[in-house]
Image: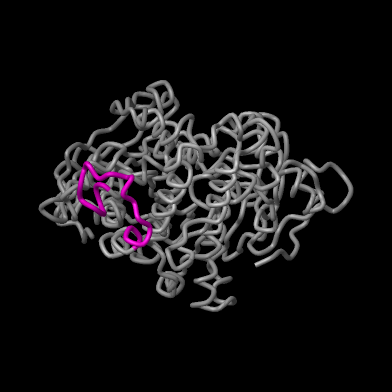
């Protein structure tokens, strides 16, 4: 069951120290790269791949079939293993176009607990002319069983794996082409967003342009919040909110708040301004799918409020109203089709049993929020949290950072990104922050994509539209190369959120936080041309 949930999670997402070479190969010789001598790294395979002939290794956790790679151009494929510690086994691949390299490098991120190489992301990059690399961050499989008793592997997952991948890839690229990439970029969502911020904070020399989507960067508190949410709906069986009640809950939220932004369109522009009271859904007679019982109302209040310790201090943000319904909403992440059949429970129990308590048989029923947050921070915060607001080294090297987060995210509460952005402003000042960082909040978008609002803006890296106003990848590259920061990005809603290219149902501008998109009052409400970026609320 969890394998199926995790595979669904990847579908949502993908819509997401090595020094100088000791013996470089001749530029352009793929086979010769097998003889490359790299510190702490072994080249397992170096082979040219003919156009359309790549077959990915089988993996139940990574979508993609051989037919999905048939339009790949010819490229040089290098498979390597890095071992920075005796307990490390960081597998990675580097792909380099045989012809038509655009001179740039694009590092690929992961999702969840990683454990697989992001072949779809690498394929998209190579098709667009980039040299690219991906890693499993030091383990295989979509759960956290590998972490039990292996603190070095937790560090590899936390930050070392992506860094090792990056410096190894640059060395291999230099050996193959005869020079380093002109520019290097990294873009990923969810855990990949955490990786992205980790790169900016710990290794500012790795990338000049970074895109961090819906980052799980406050990992320890996020998963305390996940267990808090699960506890709210499952400790007392009467508190569980079944999936059948979510449509009525979503409708009640929209009735209460949709028109607050001046436009009734099924999307909440800023859900923080929505003061929906769950008491309004309390059943007045018999229980039904159109109302909530008293225990369910109490659970819903906890979900929206977020985790608090026994002294009443907020540990992490609660979930925003407006993201309850949909394939990537609460059924997938929070409530499930039955109690404890959701991804928050999966990630929370895997994390606490394998990384915090060190007991595979840890009983989730013993979860105590005070103890959990203390131990989680003590044992894993250094390795897993990327919350350092001091990005001065990254800025001083000319780095540019774009963050984005869907307001309807049911996996990682959207205010988390706002909190991190605010911490950077507090540390570095607004003017300096504006010189290298933009945050775009996406109304109606769920986790990394999907949802009722316009949710596609090139974030999966597969869009060949190079217009910086419509493609976040193009926007970060323009900012790095020309210094022109994105003043807005146009997001599109397609009938099938994962198949851009068809006629759009809706477009809407995404505005740099704290600005929001406001309707001009006339014209088609589904056309971005009839909206302006205006001051919003911090």
Q: Is residue 509 left or right of residue 53?
A: right
- In this view, the residue in front, 321 or 145, is 321
- Is 359 magenta? The answer is yes
List x then y, in percent, for residue 29: 24, 41
How many numbered circles does the render carry? 0
Point out the image quarter for the N terminus: top left
Residue closest to the eye, 304 or 170: 304
Q: Identify which residue is drawn at 41% across, 65% down.
A: 387
Residue 348 in the figure: left or right of residue 246: left
Relative to the observer, which residue lies in front, 391 or 262? 262
x, y percent for residue 73: 41, 31
Dividing the image into 4 quarters, which one contains the C terminus?
bottom right
The percent coordinates of residue 326 (x first, y second) are 59, 34
In the rendered image, is residue 205 in sight?
yes
The magenta span reads: 353-373
Q: In the current view of this chain or complex, which residue is farthest to the front?
A: 285
Q: Looking at the image, which residue is at 48% across and 29% down?
A: 337
Q: Quadrant of residue 526?
A: top right
- Farthest residue in the left direction? 86
Q: Is residue 189 visible?
A: no
At a point 53% along the width and 77% down the height, the residue shown is 426
Is 497 left, or right, of 120 in this rendering?
right
């Amino acid at each position: 069951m969890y394998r199926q949930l995790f595979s669904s999670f990847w579908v949502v997402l993908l819509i997401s120290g090595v020094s100088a070479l000791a013996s470089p190969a001749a530029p352009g010789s793929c086979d010769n790269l097998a003889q490359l001598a790299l510190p702490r790294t072994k080249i397992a395979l170096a082979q040219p791949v003919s156009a359309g002939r790549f077959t990915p290794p089988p993996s139940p956790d990574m979508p993609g079939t051989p037919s999905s790679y048939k339009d790949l151009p010819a490229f040089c494929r290098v498979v390597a293993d890095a071992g920075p510690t005796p307990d490390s086994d960081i597998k990675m691949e580097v792909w380099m176009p045989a012809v038509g390299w655009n001179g740039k490098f694009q590092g690929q991120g992961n999702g969840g607990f990683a454990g697989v190489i992001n072949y779809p992301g690498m394929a998209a990059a190579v098709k667009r002319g980039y040299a690219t690399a991906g890693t499993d961050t030091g383990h295989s499989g979509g759960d956290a069983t590998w972490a039990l008793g292996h603190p070095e592997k937790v560090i590899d997952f936390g930050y070392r794996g992506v860094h090792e991948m990056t410096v190894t890839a640059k060395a291999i690229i230099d050996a193959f082409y005869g020079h380093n990439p002109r520019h290097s970029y990294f873009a990923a969502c969810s855990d990949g967003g955490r990786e992205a911020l980790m790169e900016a904070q710990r290794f500012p020399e790795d990338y000049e342009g970074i895109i961090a989507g819906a980052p799980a960067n406050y990992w320890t508190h996020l998963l305390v919040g996940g267990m808090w949410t699960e506890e709210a709906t499952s400790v007392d069986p009467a508190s569980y909110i079944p999936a059948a009640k979510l449509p009525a809950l979503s409708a009640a939220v929209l009735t209460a708040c949709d028109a607050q932004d001046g436009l009734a369109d099924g999307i909440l522009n800023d859900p923080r301004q929505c003061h929906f009271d769950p008491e309004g859904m309390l059943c007045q007679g018999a229980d039904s799918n159109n109302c909530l019982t008293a225990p369910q109302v109490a659970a819903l209040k906890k979900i929206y409020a977020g985790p608090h310790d026994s002294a009443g201090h907020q540990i992490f943000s609660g979930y925003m109203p407006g993201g309850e319904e949909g394939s990537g909403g609460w059924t997938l992440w929070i409530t499930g089709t039955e109690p404890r059949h959701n991804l928050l429970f999966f990630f929370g129990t895997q994390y606490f049993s394998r990384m915090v308590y060190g007991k595979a048989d840890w009983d989730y029923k013993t979860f105590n929020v005070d103890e959990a947050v203390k131990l989680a921070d003590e044992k894993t915060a250094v390795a897993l949290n990327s919350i350092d607001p001091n990005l001065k080294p990254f800025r001083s090297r000319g780095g540019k950072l774009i963050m984005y987060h869907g307001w309807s995210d049911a996996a990682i509460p959207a205010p988390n990104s706002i909190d991190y952005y605010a911490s950077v402003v507090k540390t570095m000042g607004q003017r300096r922050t504006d010189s290298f960082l933009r945050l775009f909040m996406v109304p109606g978008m769920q986790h990394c994509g999907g949802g009722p609002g316009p949710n596609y803006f090139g974030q999966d890296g597969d869009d060949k539209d190079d217009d910086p106003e419509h493609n976040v990848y193009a926007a970060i590259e323009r900012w790095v190369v020309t210094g022109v920061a994105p003043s807005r990005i146009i997001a599109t809603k397609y009938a099938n959120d994962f198949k851009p290219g068809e006629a759009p149902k809706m477009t809407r501008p995404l505005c740099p936080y704290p600005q929001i998109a406001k309707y001009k009052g006339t014209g088609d409400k589904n056309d971005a041309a009839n909206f302006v970026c205006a001051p919003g609320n911090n």
